[in-house]
Amino acid sequence: MKVNKSNARMVVFSLLSSAKLSFVGTLILSEVYALFYSFSFKRISTLYNRVPDMKKIHIGMALFLGVQMLSDVVNHTDTNNMLRGWAALAVAIVIFTFMFRMFDETPKVIVAFMIAEVVRLILFGQSNLEQDTADLAESYSAFKFRIAPITNNIILLLTYYLYNKRKDKMTVAVFILYGLMCVGLDYRSNGLFYLFTGLIILFRKQLMYMTLARKIGLTLLVGITFQILFMIYVNAVLSGEFGGKHAGTQLEETGNPYNPFSLISQGRGEFFVAIEAIKDAPILGHGSWAVDKDNHYRMMMFKDADAGKFRENSLNNSGVIPSHSVLLGAWLYAGIVGFLVMLYIFNLVLKRAFYLIKDPRAMETPYYPLIVLYTVQLIWTFPFSPLPQIRNIIPVFIAFIITVYYSLKNDEEEEDLLPDNG
């Protein structure tokens, strides 16, 4: 009965994610639902004892909110932007609380959540908060914005089932084949998530006992192999034999397309612009939804583009200083303390995730593929995804990883932590 109720709550939360309210910006009905379900000081106190990292994250997020308030006062932030910034952080705390509570009841609710997400995305598509790119970019890849969010969850459900049945080789094959398909369909970053996940699962036993020297050797081997494959990929895209329109345009505009760091610089120009903005206000930042007056910082992104392209991009920009990074966005809005808080949370969850990736007991759980994929995604999300992700996908990833970590650490005999033949 407890599992059924938890599943029902997770399904309701997912389905409500497509319903919006206009209240201090955009408020999603699932966030209102999470608030009412999570508002229990007794339950939160119990969770603090069972999952101490939840308390650390709450304290960190509260500190973030405090310094962002201070930054807004000092920077004389517009009232609407100020309230939107504070509300976003308050909502993030609520979603973290809700996810920790749900996964503490049973990690298996992740299955119900993924099924509900497939249904929601088919029926309603993504909400505006889930789209971290302007609508203009959708013309480049319908797969990225419409299809992949659905197929990602389907693939995870499939690999959960396969790994649970101890079909390890099939699990790895599904991840790698789907990753290659995503790269071919112009969703490069998503494809790399699944490719790396498949490879980590394939070599998970070797990673357990690897010495430092072997880790360094493996890193060099992976780096060289990646560079060779990347060069083959670039040639195929530029010749029109592989990839899509967006990938081809990016590579053509990159100074050295065979240098993956040049590609990141071109594809995530906001990251480097945010650094320049941070230099101008390193202590307290620029405040919530910092306005880019006179397109000062955006001009840095398009300094090599013609005037027409700059106007086109400006018209499709919300007017804030671009960052496209959780870590740098935190610094941009709330100063160095905000950055350190996000860096602390990032480091905390990576420690738990790396422990699970190498832990033989975690490898036996049906959740291992999800743990690996969520870890890979977090490593990309914190540096290269927009700050609003702290109220979107980040709470799901972090709460799931940390809850499973404490369940195994405390030697909890939960049936759903075991495979079907366990």
Image: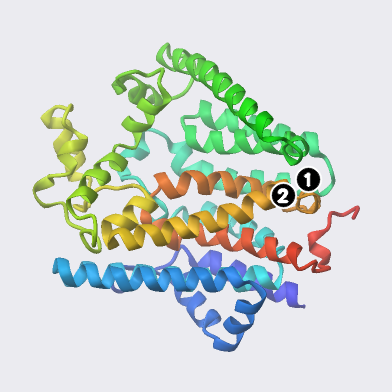
Q: Secondary structure at mark 2?
A: helix
The residue lying at 24 percent from left, 72 percent from top is 70
Q: Which residue is mark 1?
A: 163
Q: Is residue 34 visible?
A: yes
Check the picture and name the quadrant holding the C terminus. bottom right
- The vertical placement of 140 against 329, above or below, is above
Q: Residue furthest right?
A: 421
- The vertical placement of 279 against 96, above or below, is above
Front in this rendered view, residue 235 or 149:
235
Residue 131 placement (x, y as % from top left): 39, 50
Q: Residues within 10 Å of mark 1 (few under 14, many from 20)?
A: many
The residue lying at 61 percent from left, 29 percent from top is 216
Looking at the picture, which amino acid does disc 2 mark? Answer: Tyr
- Mark in front: 2 vs 1: 2
Q: Residues within 10 Å of mark 2 (few under 14, many from 20)?
A: many
Q: Secondary structure at mark 1?
A: helix
Front in this rendered view, residue 231 or 307:
231
